[in-house]
Image (spheres, helix red, strand yellow):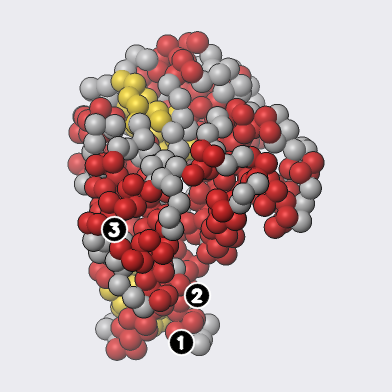
């Protein structure tokens, strides 16, 4: 291994931990610099789920770090344990798999509702390796890193049971709860556990809005045969935020037949939602009934003891030592959900790094302030819209309109995110305030901004600034 590669990587790690705190994980120390090859720093990452995670979520930040510490237009490449390296450190190109054949034309989404999964020739099927590489799961979301408490014990137990015996215990499994309570963590932990015990298992993990988008696109292009193969020729189907099916009649029809095909073939179905099946508005009764065939388990907001344990576990994952008195203070101040606890850890770590001081109780008080534990419940939506419209230079009428231009849609989504996070209003009430939008639109906005804040430092800074303004506002 070339010394320059190791020196660059060490400097990159220091840069990442200073400028991209939210992305850093303890296992970054296990990444091995291999070579500087044709203008790229080659890094070996194991296991493969970590490699794919870095390629999907962290590539730009790593490239920025490489260029910042070298002053050169240096890129970054991630390789796995099985990738071949030549004697001079150069990567040997991997074989390119043959392209799949064209889908059969099938413009009628109601036709061919066979109850058995549609099988197709091996030459026309995505390989198991490619399927696993495309699985959008995070290495952080394992059962080992999930903190179990009385608020989520049933959901955790059910998830482990089906991960160990997919299709044989509870089918389907329906996990429900509010934003940031661990539903996605459990869904991805199920996928990872199944792949550990059965590497050749065919798993399809997808968000419900993406399921709907792919369905509509397949209908428009007359490619329903290919769509059905993707979702029925699997061993495990995992769909996040199934409540996005609400009010979408054709998508519900297609999912109904997909569910029947998988269920009758003893294939595992797992879904998550922000509400139990019978409380999702505009969801067909036949789907409500099928969701109740298996296990319906709720994840509730974590109690104090669980929050303290979560803070310690999340900090450990990021390679951060948080003293117990600091963990207790954070748990007292932040009670809403796990995502906000993680945000507090990132803010504390960032402040300690910037100020070059220990992460102790004094720093925690300075970062968290003396605000009450639930200030969000006293903030009005009007306070949020005032702050956001002023910052983005838009009118409230624009946010309440049907306009979808980025100059309007981003401030609108930020408003919805902050309203969900800092007020007691329901999704429906928030949607009504912004032009009568339904709860699924609000939920999509919340998830979108939450994800972007993790990856976009500039947006994170804007959101934190707006939060400080609205929390401290006396309006």
Q: Is residue 239 above or below residue 59?
A: above
Which mark, by number, is residue 326?
3
Instruction: State the residue in front, 85 or 332.
Output: 332
Residue 120 shows in this picture: no
Marked residue nearer the N-terminal end (2 or 1): 2
Residue 9 in percent (x, y) is at: 35, 79
Residue 269 in percent (x, y) is at: 36, 27
Residue 178 shows in this picture: yes
Residue 148 in percent (x, y) is at: 23, 38
Q: Is residue 40 above or below residue 146?
A: below
Place residue 345 in its image quadrant: bottom left
Question: In percent of the image, x 27 and y 70: which residue is there?
Answer: 29
Please give the residue where the numbered disc 1 appears in the rendered image: 70
Please give the residue where the numbered disc 2 appears in the rendered image: 64
Is 195 left or right of 20, judged from the image as shown?
Answer: left
Secondary structure beneath label 1: helix
Disc 2 to disc 1, C-alpha distance: 10 Å
Residue 424 in percent (x, y) is at: 52, 34
Marked residue nearer the N-terminal end (1 or 3): 1
Is 38 left or right of 139, judged from the image as shown?
Answer: right
């Amino acid at each position: 291994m070339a010394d320059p590669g190791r020196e660059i990587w060490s400097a990159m790690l220091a840069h990442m931990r200073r400028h991209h705190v939210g992305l850093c994980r303890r296992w970054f120390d296990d990444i091995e610099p291999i070579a500087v090859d044709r203008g790229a720093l080659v890094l070996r990452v194991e296991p493969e789920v970590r490699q794919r995670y870095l390629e999907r979520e962290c590539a730009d930040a790593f490239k920025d770090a490489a260029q910042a510490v070298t002053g050169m237009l240096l890129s970054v490449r991630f390789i796995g344990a099985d990738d071949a390296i030549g004697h001079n450190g150069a990567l040997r190109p991997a074989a390119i798999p043959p392209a799949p054949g064209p889908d059969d034309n099938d413009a009628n989404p109601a036709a061919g509702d066979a109850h058995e999964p549609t099988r197709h020739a091996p030459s026309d099927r995505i390989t198991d390796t490619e399927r696993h590489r495309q699985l959008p799961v995070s290495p952080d979301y394992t059962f080992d890193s999930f903190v179990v408490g009385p608020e989520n014990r049933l959901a955790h137990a059910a998830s482990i049971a089906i991960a160990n015996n997919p299709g044989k215990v509870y089918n389907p499994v329906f996990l429900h709860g509010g934003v940031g309570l661990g539903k996605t963590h459990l869904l991805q932990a199920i996928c990872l556990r199944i792949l550990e015990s059965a590497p050749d298992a065919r798993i399809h993990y997808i968000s419900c809005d993406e399921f709907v988008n792919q369905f509509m696109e397949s209908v428009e292009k007359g490619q329903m045969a290919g769509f059905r193969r993707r979702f029925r020729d699997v061993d495990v189907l995992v769909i996040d935020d199934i409540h996005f099916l609400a009010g979408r009649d054709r998508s519900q029809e297609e999912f109904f037949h997909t569910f029947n095909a998988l269920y009758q073939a003893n294939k595992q179905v797992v879904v998550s939602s922000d509400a139990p099946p019978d409380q999702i508005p505009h969801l067909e009764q036949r789907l409500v009934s099928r969701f109740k065939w298996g296990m319906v388990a709720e994840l509730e907001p974590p109690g104090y003891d669980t929050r303290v344990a979560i803070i310690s576990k999340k900090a450990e994952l990021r390679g951060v030592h948080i003293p117990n008195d600091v963990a207790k203070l954070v748990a007292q101040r932040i009670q809403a959900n796990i995502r906000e606890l993680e945000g507090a850890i990132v803010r504390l770590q960032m402040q300690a790094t910037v100020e070059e001081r220990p992460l102790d109780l004094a720093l925690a008080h300075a970062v968290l302030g003396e605000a009450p534990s639930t200030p969000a419940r006293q903030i009005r939506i009007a306070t949020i819209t005032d702050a956001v419209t002023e910052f983005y230079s838009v009118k409230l009428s624009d946010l309440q309109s049907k306009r979808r231009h980025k100059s309007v849609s981003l401030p609108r989504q930020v408003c919805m995110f902050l309203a969900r996070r800092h007020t007691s209003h329901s999704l429906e009430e928030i949607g009504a305030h912004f032009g009568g939008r339904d709860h699924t639109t609000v939920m999509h906005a919340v998830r979108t901004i939450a994800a972007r804040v993790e990856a976009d430092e500039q947006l994170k800074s804007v959101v934190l600034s707006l939060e400080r303004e609205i929390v401290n506002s006396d309006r």
